[in-house]
Amino acid sequence: MSTRVESWLPLSPGERTVAIEVLTHGPLSRSEIARRLNLSAGSLTRLTKPLLESGLLVEEGTPTASSRQGRPSQPLDIVADSRYFAGFKITEDMVYGVVTTLRSDIVARQDRPLTTHEPHAVADLLQEMTDGFARGFPRLAGVGIGVGGRVRERSTVVESVFLGWDEVHFADLVEERTGLPVVVENDVAALVEAETWFGAGRGLERFAVLTIGAGIGYGLVLGGKRVRTAEDGRGVGRRWIVDPYGPLTPDGERGSAIALLTIPSIRHQVQAAVGREVSYAEILTLAAEGDPLTSRVLNEAARGLGTLVAQIANFAMPQKILLAGEGVGLVDVAGTAVQEAILANRHPLADPVVLEMKVSDFHDWAQGAAVLAIQVLVLGAGEG
């Protein structure tokens, strides 16, 4: 069993604000922190003193010119390797695990097959993986877990279709076994939080994430904070109709985002036409080589994706949209169709859509879960 390490908690709201600012934007001079947070020099000194004494912050060795005081000052930074965090992404048949620093850099990975969905057995597997991580990183401070489905209070899996879970108090099961604080969250929510703090959405007021893979995921950030809704974890996209004359597949309404864009739906369409099993990678390769059948399916999907991206841009008006997940290889093959559909569904004078692509693997999702652990367990941020 892992041993709980000493935490910095509790941080006061002011200390937390300073710590998050340095964590996500540091190293920063004191004058820059004061400017960003609208603090006086005296208030900042009072707030940073306990953070420095606890070892959460450190003064960098190289002085920088202070814009206000006109004399050198040492910038403050987070001690990134002062604590480590385990993050796990649970899929239908695998558990993907990572260890990250306090700044979310991945320093270790481990993957294990999932042979049962029985909650106690899955918790036992996470204990084994966590104990293995703790041997290499004894300052392991917490565990974050991402699952596909609905999660309540970042501890109970209310429903997960992939795992067949209903009202599973999974955080308690893992915490009992590891001796570490545990946070559980919907996997898309965790990814959105990670990208907001450390990735494509860092520093943006309005930011959207659209994920494509086995399903469709969507997250919206307004005012630098993720918008939480009753739809979180319920499987968006089944009723997002992007082409009313689009394909009918086993999942989702005809022409919905699910029916058009997900990997299982694209495979279903191709396999129905060719009469054999075809992997998603093979479909992408065939289309890139000019195969007419797979090109038709992917171009239809790409037009649907462009329409959906344009709708998000029209109504949410984000500064950037991140397209992530295992299915975004579609854009590499049919990117022209995506862009044409975006333009066709936007006002001619509208600002260009800033679209960033990230072909995510499941370690990225596990990293997102670790970021949730950093937010909730260490800094006490992002609850609710």
Image (cartoon, rainbow, N blue to C red):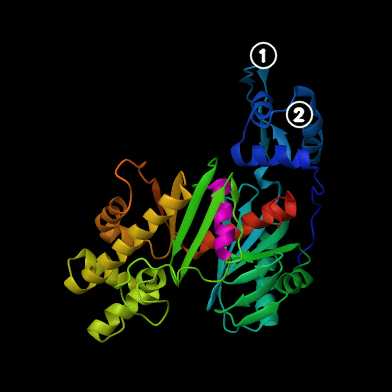
The segment highlighted magenta reads 187-199
Q: Residue at x 64, y 18 (%)?
A: 66
State the mark number for residue 362.
none
Asked if 291 appears above or below 310 in the picture, the reply is: below
The residue at the far top in this view is 70
Asked which secondary structure carries label 2, the reply is: helix
Judging depth in this view, the residue of 18 and 60 nearest the camera is 18
Mark 2 residue type: Leu
Query: Residue 191 lies in magenta, yes or no?
Result: yes
Q: Residue at x 74, y 51 (%)?
A: 380
What residue occupies the far bottom of the structure in this picture? Answer: 275
Q: What secondary structure prevails in the magenta region?
A: helix
Question: Is the residue marked by circle 2 packed among few (<14), some (14-19), or many (20+) residues within 10 Å?
Answer: some
Upstream in the sequence, badge 2 or badge 1? Answer: 2
Figure check: 150 above or below 312? below
- Would residue 275 be visible to someone looking at this image? yes
Q: Residues within 10 Å of mark 1 (few under 14, many from 20)?
A: few
Q: CA distance from mark 2 to mark 1?
A: 17 Å
Q: Secondary structure at mark 1?
A: loop
Q: Is residue 200 left or right of residue 285?
A: right
Instruction: Residue at 66% x, 80% y: name it.
Output: 166
Relative placement, left or right, of 117 versus 213 is right
In the picture, which quadrant includes the N terminus?
bottom right
Residue linked to disc 2: 44
Instruction: Report whether residue 139 is seen.
Output: no
Describe residue 154's horizontal placement relative to residue 10 as left or right.
Answer: left
The question of residue 75 being in magenta is answered with no
* Residue nearest the observer in this picture, 263 or 247: 247
- Which residue is under mark 1? 71
